[in-house]
Image: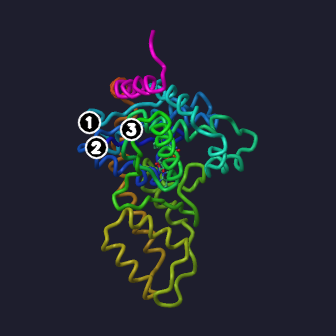
Amino acid sequence: METVLSGIRSTGQLHLGNYFGALRNFVEMQHENRCFFFIADYHSLTTHPDPTHLHDNIRTILAEYLAAGLDPDVATLYIQSDVPEVAELSLLLSMHAYVGELERTASFKEKIRKQPDNVNVGLLSYPVLMAADILIHRATRVPVGKDQEQHLELTRRFARRFNQIYGVDFFPESQPYTSNHELIKIPGLNGSGKMGKSEGNCVYLTDDEKTIHKKVMKAVTDSGPTEPNSPMPEVIANLFTILRAVSTPEVVADFTAKWNDCSIRYGDLKKQLAADINATVAPIRERYAEIVGDEAYLSKVVRQGAEKARASADATLSQVREIMGIRKF
Ligand code: TYM
């Protein structure tokens, strides 16, 4: 049995990228493994969200996760800031994380570019906090999308370094979890790059059928193939990547054949894509509507999750303190 941990920042609704990158696999594996799922609200503070929105964002994601099939009686579902042990472990790990290696992280460099007026320490130490999230439960598997690959590499590096410095075999080297050994990147509908909240190119799990249809029909395409079996330009390959995630292999094979013999009609491809995205998210959307207003249920889930997560976190942290020489009088 593996210890699996997955996390998501509390910065809005979940989109297809989050679902296929970090959630769907997780839902499938919760019964066979020791699974932790949490909402990374500390991490979202690095971009200074409006305090009046933070709580609602957490509620939205909590309800979406439950709607997607996470069972809080099986997996441990919690909010990062409900587990103060994570913050302490992050502080302890930061003593062995070097400024140079953090400055070289791709996500940090991107933030410097995107928000030059807010290069805060939280952004620099983001990977340390993320390592603490993972190592606090000594997780062996982490379902993440391709964009988190480097953060996971750093987590392994911090774990190895800790073990070496203190001469222990305490932290595992957490591996990404994927079903086919490839990290997933769901692209956006605007031609290039990944689907992401800050990119404004998302289909959300709670979008209604009409909205999905509208977004997909507006997706960028080209003028179509002119030679049989020609390589796909990125904009079209992106649509096929999403198609592979939501449609049956037969549908994918059919449109691939039509691409190859130049008979493909993008209107048909988009209609099929919109219908299959809708079929994927419709049950989630419906359950979300039932759950999101149920304050009593949500707070029960959160209390129960915090209790289970803290028990696991405390077991790790007390050993880390001992290993580092922090002992009680
Ligand atoms: P976040 O909130 O940006 O995204 C949550 C998860 O969704 C995946 N994801 C995608 N996967 C495929 N295609 C996409 N277009 C796409 N967009 C997002 C992300 O890879 C991620 O797995 N730093 C993390 C949150 C975090 C975390 C952790 C994750 C904090 N601590 C510990 C795992 C373990 C983040 O910003 O993810």
Distance between the Cα atoms at labels 3 and 1? 29 Å
Return the residue at label 2: 30
Distance between the Cα atoms at labels 2 and 1? 7 Å
Compare marks 2 and 1 and give the one earlier in the sequence: 2
Left or right: where does residue 193 sit relative to residue 4? Answer: right
Foreground residue among 161 and 201: 161
The image quarter in which residue 172 lies: top left
Q: Is mark 1 within 8 Å of ligand 1?
A: no
Foreground residue among 74 and 101: 101
Q: Say what secondary structure mark 2 lies in.
A: loop
- The amino acid marked with disc number 2 is Gln
* Numbered mark located on residue 74 in the image: 1
Q: Say what secondary structure mark 1 lies in.
A: loop
Q: Is residue 243 above or below residue 97?
A: below
Check whether the beta carbons of the residues at disc 2 and disc 1 lie within 8 A of each other.
yes
Q: Nearer the viewer, mark 3 or mark 2?
A: 3
Can residue 326 be found in the magenta stretch? yes
What is the magenta segment's predominant secondary structure?
helix
Determine crowd level at label 2: few under 14, some 14-19, many 20+ residues with C-alpha closer than 10 A. Answer: many
Determine crowd level at label 1: few under 14, some 14-19, many 20+ residues with C-alpha closer than 10 A. Answer: some
Return the residue at label 3: 169
| Picture residue at 49% right of the left edge, 43% below the top | 155
Question: Over which residues does the magenta segment extend?
Answer: 309-329
The colouring scheme, among rainbow, by chain, secondary structure or one colour, is: rainbow
- The amino acid marked with disc number 1 is Val
Extreme-right residue of the structure: 117
| Picture residue at 60% right of the left edge, 28% below the top | 51
Q: Is residue 55 above or below residue 5?
A: above
